[in-house]
Image (spheres, rainbow, N blue to C red):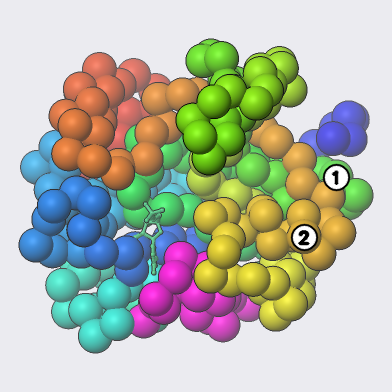
């Protein structure tokens, strides 16, 4: 990414729209409600992300993609709710229709440990570097990763120094994401940066803590609650307002 002085705090204020995708089912969690509504630390999971985005200086409006017809279950004053789609990228596409700023930050409601600092760092890095279309949160990989064949036999050991575990938030130039979504394989994309890559765009990574976990299975909730408890009282606290 480009070096040099970054944009000032005043230029950054409210420069981006947040798009929180919260339209997934709670199937893998074994939950009877959509995943974003499953309680984590005493509040619906999506509220942790919402709170972090409300505190981020770079964020103006907040759009949340919710399960179709489920807006009434989200108490999200001051935000705009839009019906999501049947694949994650379709929910992003639906929310993108409401974005009017040049920059948009896409985030999974399933990552309640996101911080305002991480959000602002991503937007700032993107604004500062005109040569990249996206800046995405990514953690170093500590496990050794091997590629295996269909027979469960190891085919290759990958150099973990070159690997990153990609997360959200992901900050985009809105027009680049719109173009990538218009031409991309939405059903096959597990993140939006993939669509930018597929369209020939440049994606930069922003170092992110491994604590920014995604809630997928029930034990992830216990881990998130432990991490939220240990972060409480620190400058990155996600305490309820
Ligand atoms: O299913 P997965 O954990 O990968 O979902 C990541 C995020 O995408 C979650 O916050 C989920 O609510 C959201 N999602 C969505 N629309 C879908 C599927 C997932 O907004 N159709």
State which quadrant residue 239 falls in: top left
Q: Quadrant of the C terminus?
A: top left
Where is residue 185? Give x, y as percent: 64, 71
The answer to whether 11 is drawn above or below residue 214 in the figure is below
Where is residue 238? Give x, y as percent: 30, 35
State which quadrant residue 201 falls in: bottom right
On residue 198, which mark appears?
Answer: 2
The answer to whether 170 is drawn above or below residue 85 in the figure is above
Residue at point 69% right, 72% down? 184
Q: How many marks?
A: 2
Where is residue 191? Give x, y as percent: 57, 54
Q: Is residue 141 visible?
A: yes
- Neighbour tally class for label 1: few under 14, some 14-19, many 20 plus, Cα within 10 Å: some
Determine whether the residue tagged by mark 2 lies in a helix, strand or loop: helix
Q: CA distance from mark 2 to mark 1?
A: 20 Å
User: Does the magenta segment cover residue 89?
Assistant: yes
Determine whether the residue tagged by mark 1 lies in a helix, strand or loop: loop
């Amino acid at each position: 990414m480009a070096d040099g002085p970054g944009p000032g705090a005043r230029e950054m204020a409210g420069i981006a729209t947040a798009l929180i995708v919260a339209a997934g089912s709670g199937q893998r969690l074994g939950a009877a409600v959509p995943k974003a509504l499953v309680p984590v630390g005493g509040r619906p999971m999506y509220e942790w992300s919402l709170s972090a985005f409300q505190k981020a200086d770079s964020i103006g409006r907040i759009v949340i993609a919710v399960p179709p017809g489920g807006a009434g279950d989200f108490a999200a004053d001051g935000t705009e709710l839009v019906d999501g789609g049947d694949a994650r990228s379709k929910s992003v596409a639906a929310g993108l229709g409401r974005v009017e700023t040049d920059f948009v930050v896409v985030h999974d409601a399933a990552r309640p440990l996101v911080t305002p600092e991480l959000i602002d760092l991503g937007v700032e890095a993107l604004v500062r570097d005109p040569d990249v279309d996206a800046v995405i949160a990514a953690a170093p990989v500590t496990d050794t990763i091997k590629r295996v064949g269909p027979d469960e036999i190891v085919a290759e050991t990958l150099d973990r120094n070159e690997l990153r575990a990609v997360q959200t938030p992901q900050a985009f130039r809105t027009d680049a994401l719109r173009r990538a979504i218009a031409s991309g394989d939405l059903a096959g994309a597990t993140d939006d940066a993939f669509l930018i890559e597929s369209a020939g765009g440049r994606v930069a990574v922003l170092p992110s803590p491994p604590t920014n976990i995604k809630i997928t299975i029930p034990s992830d909730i216990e881990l998130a609650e432990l991490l939220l408890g240990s972060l409480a009282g620190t400058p990155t606290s996600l305490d309820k307002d």
